[in-house]
Image (cartoon, rainbow, N blue to C red):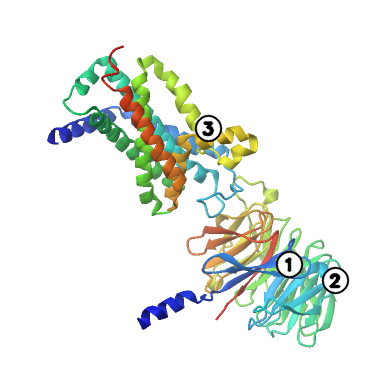
């Protein structure tokens, strides 16, 4: 009897599952997806044109680029309330949180500037001149190097985080959108949307060490536009969003060969893994949905309707 | 009872024998949907993916969409083929031998129906196997779950074939069946395009497709392949099977005198 009622009680209590938070650029909202049921469980109103989205290291607050509000909003993930705004410079599009869990490196698309903001004192620490239309942002795992990619100058700008000054600029293909450090910070990957490539740099020498091309059967090469990418456990493979080709490529991170293309929704830009990197969630802007990919079998399992023009995604554990 | 079973075995065995002896027919029955799958669907490949309609959970390529329709095509052609063979039997006189068996007429017709459906399903699975070899793979359990749907759809189309065969007096008229039954049934259905796509071009076309029993048979197969339940499609398919079977019984009713040409 007791056991039965306990079971009934457990069934009645909503079990908390991990979440994926998706910023909807056109709706000015965040859609929260339950990782277990694969359904949208919450929709949160935020500032105008939300794009870059990331949690603090302890997941106690969410940082969100509200591009048309010219601010980075700090949101309480429990209540969904906006706690305060951070000064961010004009039109913040993407940002990255430094491993010190305190400094945000923000790309100001309209101003050709990278702004460094202290999230505790809520002040601008530095503004660094970079190329035109900065977008992609990355920080090395040791926190010593920050990267900004500029979409029009077609460069990756290497910033020394001690001095907050550029120490190198490397050319990449047309319109670089996203950058990531991999293999414990020894390699830097930069995707070029119009160039249709990913360029790989050796971090120690800033020299180019490889380039990845993409080719989706039946899709015009102009539509194959790599943007966001993420790495599987151990950095063995990269999943690369290929924009309006509606496909995600699986790239072997050792040989730099593309192993597979996975069909997702329309104009896929960014993505996020779940806790154990077993499922991948891609944001499909034009079709307004998120496709879930089973990482092991590399098959799309479900597509979930979210708001209009989903842009970025961030993982939030609930335990 | 024993006599009934003997008749069943004999009729099914005859169907099987006929099938085995006509290897061209087997190959033709497979080549037809495979041409559609590997040539037609390739042209319409829609590399950018088709929008999501139930039972699909995510974006799919056209090759994936067209598979249930092609399974329906196999069943449809086979159902018609067996009606063709009945017309042939009648012309040759072997049907008289069959129908004079001291068993109820409905039992003889049912046996014939079961025989032709079994062969249809065999072909359907071979087709699924070849499609899988070309990389068009469906959910593993879907291959099992689709069996009852294939049986029902096969019975429905077989019953339609039987009903038609009772009205077609000569082999030459079979071309008419092709023109007025097979083609409209196949093209005015959800086999090649989802119904919402039809509605985009014409509401009337959509409505015709929506009442076409073949649409429901195809949808039943489609949902079963994805382990999903479609009550409406099931209901319509069962109803259509009943109507076609009744028509066949009426057509072969000795009192009506089907042999009274």
Q: Which mark is residue A51?
A: 1
Q: Which mark is residue A90?
A: 2
Residue at 38% across / 24% down in the picture? B164
Please provide percent x and percent y for residue A302. 54, 58
Q: Which mark is residue A189?
A: none
Mark 2 residue element: loop
Q: CA distance from mark 2 to mark 1?
A: 14 Å
- For label 1, count other residues whose C-alpha is less than 10 Å away and answer few (under 14), some (14-19) or many (20+): many
Is residue A286 in view from this perspective? yes
Is residue A130 in view from this perspective? no
Chain holding disc 3:
B
Residue at 83% across / 67% down in the picture? A131
Same chain letter for marks 2 and 1: yes
Q: CA distance from mark 3 to mark 2?
A: 56 Å
Which residue extends farthest top? B261
Mark 3 residue element: loop
Q: Which residue is mark 3?
A: B188
Q: Is residue A258 above or below residue A46?
A: above
Please provide percent x and percent y for residue A73. 76, 76
Q: Which sits earlier in the primary sequence, circle 2 or circle 1?
A: 1
Please provide percent x and percent y for residue B249. 31, 27
Which residue extends farthest bottom? A121
Locate residue A181: give its quadrant. Answer: bottom right
Left-right relation of B159 to B138: left
Q: Which quarter of the image is occupied by the N terminus of chain A?
A: bottom left
């Amino acid at each position: 009897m007791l056991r039965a009622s306990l079971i009934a009680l457990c069934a009645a209590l909503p079990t908390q599952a991990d979440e994926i938070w998706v910023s909807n650029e056109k709706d000015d909202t965040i859609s929260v997806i339950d990782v277990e049921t694969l359904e949208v469980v919450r929709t949160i109103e935020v500032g105008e044109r939300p794009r870059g989205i990331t949690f603090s290291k302890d997941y106690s607050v969410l940082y969100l680029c509200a591009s048309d509000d010219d601010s980075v909003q700090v949101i309480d993930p429990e209540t969904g309330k906006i706690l305060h705004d951070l000064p961010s410079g004009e039109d913040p599009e993407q940002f990255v949180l430094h491993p010190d869990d305190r400094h945000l490196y923000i790309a100001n698309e309209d101003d050709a500037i990278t702004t460094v903001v202290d999230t505790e004192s809520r002040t601008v620490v530095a503004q660094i001149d970079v190329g035109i239309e900065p977008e992609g942002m990355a920080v090395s795992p040791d926190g010593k190097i920050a990267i900004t990619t500029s979409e029009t100058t077609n460069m990756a700008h290497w910033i020394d985080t001690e001095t907050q000054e550029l120490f190198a600029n490397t050319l990449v293909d047309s319109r670089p959108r996203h950058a990531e450090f991999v293999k414990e910070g020894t390699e830097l990957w930069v995707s070029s949307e119009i160039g249709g490539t990913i360029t790989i740099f050796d971090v120690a020498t800033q020299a180019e060490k490889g380039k990845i091309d993409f080719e989706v059967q039946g899709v015009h090469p102009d539509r194959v536009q790599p943007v966001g990418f993420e790495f599987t456990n151990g950095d063995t493979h990269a999943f690369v969003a290929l924009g309006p080709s509606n496909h995600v490529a699986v790239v072997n991170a050792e040989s730099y060969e593309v192993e597979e293309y996975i069909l997702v929704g329309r104009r896929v830009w960014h993505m996020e893994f779940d806790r154990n990197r077993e499922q991948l969630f891609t944001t499909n802007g034009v079709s307004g949905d998120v496709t879930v990919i089973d990482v092991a079998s590399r098959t799309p399992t479900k597509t979930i309707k979210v708001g209009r023009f989903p842009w970025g995604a961030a993982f939030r554990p609930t335990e | 009872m024993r006599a009934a079973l003997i008749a069943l075995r004999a009729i099914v065995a005859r169907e099987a024998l006929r099938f085995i002896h006509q290897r061209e027919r087997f190959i033709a029955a497979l080549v037809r949907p495979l041409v559609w799958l590997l040539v037609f669907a390739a042209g319409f490949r829609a590399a950018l993916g088709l929008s999501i309609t139930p039972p699909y959970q995510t974006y799919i390529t056209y090759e994936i969409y067209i598979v249930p329709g092609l399974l329906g095509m196999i069943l449809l052609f086979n159902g018609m083929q067996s009606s063709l063979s009945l017309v042939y039997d009648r012309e040759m006189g072997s049907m008289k031998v069959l129908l004079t068996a001291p068993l109820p007429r409905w039992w003889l017709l049912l046996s014939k129906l079961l025989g032709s459906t079994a062969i249809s399903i065999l072909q359907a699975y071979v087709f699924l196997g070849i499609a899988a070899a070309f990389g068009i793979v469906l959910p593993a359990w879907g291959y099992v779950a689709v069996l009852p749907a294939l049986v029902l759809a096969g019975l429905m189309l077989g019953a339609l074939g039987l009903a038609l065969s009772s009205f077609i007096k000569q082999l030459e008229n079979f071309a008419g069946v092709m023109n007025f039954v097979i083609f409209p049934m196949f093209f005015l259905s959800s086999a090649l395009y989802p119904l919402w796509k039809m509605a985009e071009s014409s509401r009337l076309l959509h409505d015709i497709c929506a009442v076409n029993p073949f649409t429901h048979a195809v949808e039943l197969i489609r949902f079963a392949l994805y382990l999903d339940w479609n009550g409406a499609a099931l209901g319509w398919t069962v109803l259509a099977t009943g109507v076609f079977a009744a028509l066949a019984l009426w057509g072969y009713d000795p009192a009506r005198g089907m042999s009274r040409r």
